[in-house]
Image (tube, rainbow, N blue to C red):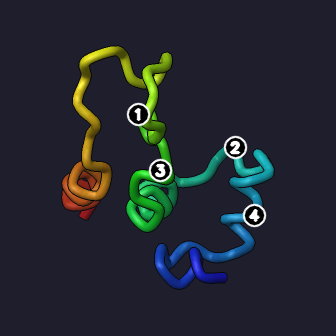
Amino acid sequence: MQLEGLSEVDQSMISRIENARAPNAALYKVVLLGSALGNAFPLGSCPHDHVCSWRPPGSPRPVMPTALSRLLDHLD
């Protein structure tokens, strides 16, 4: 319910996305969730502090809310 308040995505949609039961979820809803979750939502990058397949050695850690904000601006 807290995520619903932060993201403005309906809790039932959040539940469907969490359970992989929303194959046709609109991209803007995923972006809103990513924006609300910040670095806890690995949209194109690894949220961990270790090197893994999400984030190669030496690559900078991206700032997710800024990138998501730019994407949201283009959707308006």
Quadrant position of the C terminus in the picture: bottom left
User: 73 or 58: nearer the eye?
Assistant: 58
Find the distance from the CA under tag 4 to the CA under tag 1.
21 Å
Mark 2 highlights which residue? 23
Instruction: Report which residue position mark 4 lands on.
Output: 15
Mark 4 vs mark 1: give the one in front: 1
| Foreground residue among 42 and 50 | 50
Q: Nearer the viewer, mark 2 or mark 1?
A: 1
Neighbours of disc 3 within 10 Å: few (<14), some (14-19), many (20+):
few
> Disc 3 residue type?
Leu
Task: Write down the residue under mark 3.
Answer: 27
Task: Tell me the number on the disc at residue 44.
Answer: 1
> In the depicted view, which residue is nearer to us: 50 or 4?
50
48 in relation to 6, above or below: above
For this view, does 56 lie left or right of residue 19?
Answer: left
Sequence-wise, which precedes: disc 2 or disc 1? 2
Q: CA distance from mark 4 to mark 2?
A: 12 Å
Instruction: Name which residue type carries label 2.
Output: Pro
Residue 60 drawn at (x, y percent):
23, 30
Residue at image point 69% right, 43% down: 23
Helix, strand or loop at mark 4: helix
Query: Where does residue 27 sit, x and y in percent of width and height?
Result: 47, 50
Q: CA distance from mark 1 to mark 3?
A: 14 Å
